[in-house]
Amino acid sequence: MIQKCNPARSWRLAAPSCVWPETAAVNCRRLARSVDEVGLYLLELESCLAYGPDDLPQKDFGLRYHLHLPLDLPWRHGGDAAFFAMEGLLHKTARLSPWAMVLHPPDSLAALEAFLGALADAGGDPASVLLENTEGISPAEALDMAGAAGCGLCLDLGHMLAMGHDLPAADPEFVGKARMLHVYSPFGAEGPPPGRRHTHRTLSCLSPAGRDRLTWMLANLRPESVVVEVFAPVHFMESLHVLAALAAGRPGPAASPEGR
């Protein structure tokens, strides 16, 4: 059985708000039995701006929250325009007091700084923005942007493994900036298919090298939250057991047939 609040670890166990094919409100109610925190995954700008009162949780369910900002922000119009386009999402979720906002960074530092400037002008804290490494932006590049712009870092294990990116472990800013982890396997147990297609598989599908990387991150970094970024109930629960085992220094179970 998963121990939701484990005093042996310093980080909060977190989940995305889309484990079940239900509303975020239903997911949060169900997830409150298993995790400490939920990330509200607001990945599509227009559909999330259209959310009504039944789509998002009306109470906190004893959870802490963060936001994952849309993947389709209009960066081509500038960072301030990207912020203004999604500002309504901050109002929709304000009652839940999210502590952080995960952002796939734009290509340019100038656009990011304009986005953060607009956030500050609206009363937000730029330090609450966590830049995620992506398939196109390595952890080292995301860390450089975070350091220049005054925000934090969300390390995505799957993106890192899928693209063969390294951790910037020698950078003195790295540990302090890495405030969140996204953990999952980017491939099935059979390994990367042609073209390195990136998916979100159960943690039991991690290769030995992937498990070693995750174990190192859990032992050497000080994230506030570790998000099991798996979007199917059975595989999510399986991943919680793998994460608990790796955090305790055990290898964890192998992939189930369904998880392959």
Image: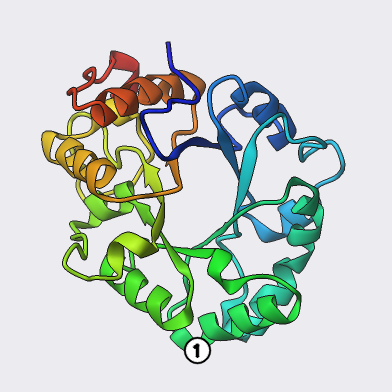
x, y percentage for residue 20?
59, 27
x, y percentage for residue 37?
57, 37
> What's the residue at 74%, 74% (across, down)?
123
Characterize the local packing of mark 1: few (<14), some (14-19) or many (20 or more) Cα atoms within 10 angstroms.
Answer: few
> In the image shown, does 12 or 7 lie closer to the viewer?
7
Image position of 188 (left or right of 95): left
Q: Is residue 65 among what the camera can see? A: yes
Image position of 8 (left or right of 127): left
Looking at the image, is 120 positioned above or below residue 220?
below
Residue lying farthest to the left in this orientation? 208
Quadrant of the image occupied by residue 227: top left
> In the image shown, does 101 or 150 lie closer to the viewer?
150
> What's the residue at 25%, 26% (across, down)?
248
How many marks do you count on the picture? 1
Quadrant of the image occupied by residue 235: top left
Residue lying farthest to the top in this orientation? 1
> What's the residue at 30%, 48% (across, down)?
157
Residue lying farthest to the bottom in this orientation? 110
Quadrant of the image occupied by residue 87: bottom right
Quadrant of the snapshot with the C terminus: top left
> In the image shown, does 129 or 184 lie closer to the viewer?
129
Looking at the image, is 199 positioned above or below residue 94?
above
Quadrant of the snapshot with the N terminus: top left
Q: Is residue 138 among what the camera can see? A: no
x, y percentage for residue 174?
29, 65
Name the residue tied to disc 1.
Answer: 110
